[in-house]
Image (spheres, rainbow, N blue to C red):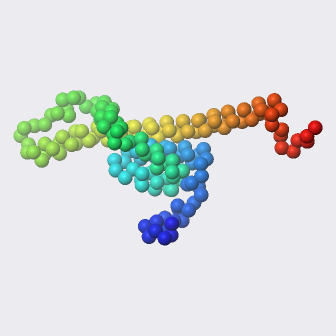
């Protein structure tokens, strides 16, 4: 990393093993940060998620991959759903988003139109960001615990059937 001029200031942080290990807490944090960044940040989601991951010692690759929840195929649907959710939360009526007076100029109409669409959309995106980050964190935590428990039960069952002997057990 030291050979790349742009990465030199971050070499100490990027060299930390905490952001590269796959453990339950790091992966859960990375998932949450990636999902949050994917919804809340309109552009440069992956670098933003990576910076957050380094800051809170989350798994950096997982954070970067989780931002792909918003991709060119899903963005139109997500933004439309976010607009509907934001409009519902802000209690905006359908007529409020189209109430543009003919007395104002084209620039003012455009700004008014953008504000009436962008406000509810971003409120919806923030709701999606917080909700998906929370859900992602919880699902990874419980999923990881369940996976470890299943592996442990299988190992204990094999050991009980005599397929695996505990370490240090003498052969008969």
Does residue 59 sit above or below 165 in this rendering? below
Viewer-closest of 11 and 117: 11
Query: Could you tell whether 99 is left or right of 126 in the image?
Result: left
User: In the rendered image, is residue 90 in sight?
Assistant: no
- The residue shown at (18%, 29%) is 95
Q: Farthest residue toward the left? A: 103
How many marks the image carries: the answer is 0
Q: Position of residue 71 (x, y in %)?
A: 37, 43
Does residue 109 sit above or below 13 in this rendering? above
| Residue 164 location, quadrant | top right
Q: Position of residue 138 (x, y in %)?
A: 54, 37
- The residue shown at (44%, 70%) is 5
Viewer-closest of 71 and 115: 71
Q: Farthest residue toward the right? A: 172
Query: Could you tell whether 21 is left or right of 103 in the image?
Result: right
Does residue 129 sit above or below 48 in this rendering? above
Query: Could you tell whether 70 is left or right of 18 in the image?
Result: left
- The residue shown at (59%, 52%) is 21
């Amino acid at each position: 990393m030291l050979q790349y001029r742009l990465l030199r200031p971050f070499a100490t942080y990027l060299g930390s093993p905490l952001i590269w290990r796959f453990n339950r807490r790091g992966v859960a944090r990375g998932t949450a940060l990636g999902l949050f960044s994917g919804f809340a940040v309109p552009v440069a989601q992956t670098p933003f998620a990576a910076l957050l991951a380094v800051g809170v010692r989350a798994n950096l690759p997982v954070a970067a991959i989780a931002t792909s929840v918003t991709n060119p195929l899903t963005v139109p649907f997500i933004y439309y759903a976010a607009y509907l959710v934001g409009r519902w939360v802000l209690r905006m009526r359908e007529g409020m988003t189209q109430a543009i007076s003919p007395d104002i100029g084209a620039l003012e109409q455009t700004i008014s139109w953008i504000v009436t669409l962008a406000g509810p959309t971003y409120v919806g995106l923030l709701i999606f960001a917080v909700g998906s980050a929370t859900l992602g964190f919880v699902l990874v935590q419980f999923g990881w615990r369940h996976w470890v428990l299943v592996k442990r039960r299988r190992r204990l069952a094999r050991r009980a059937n005599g397929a695996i002997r505990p370490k240090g057990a003498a052969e008969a």
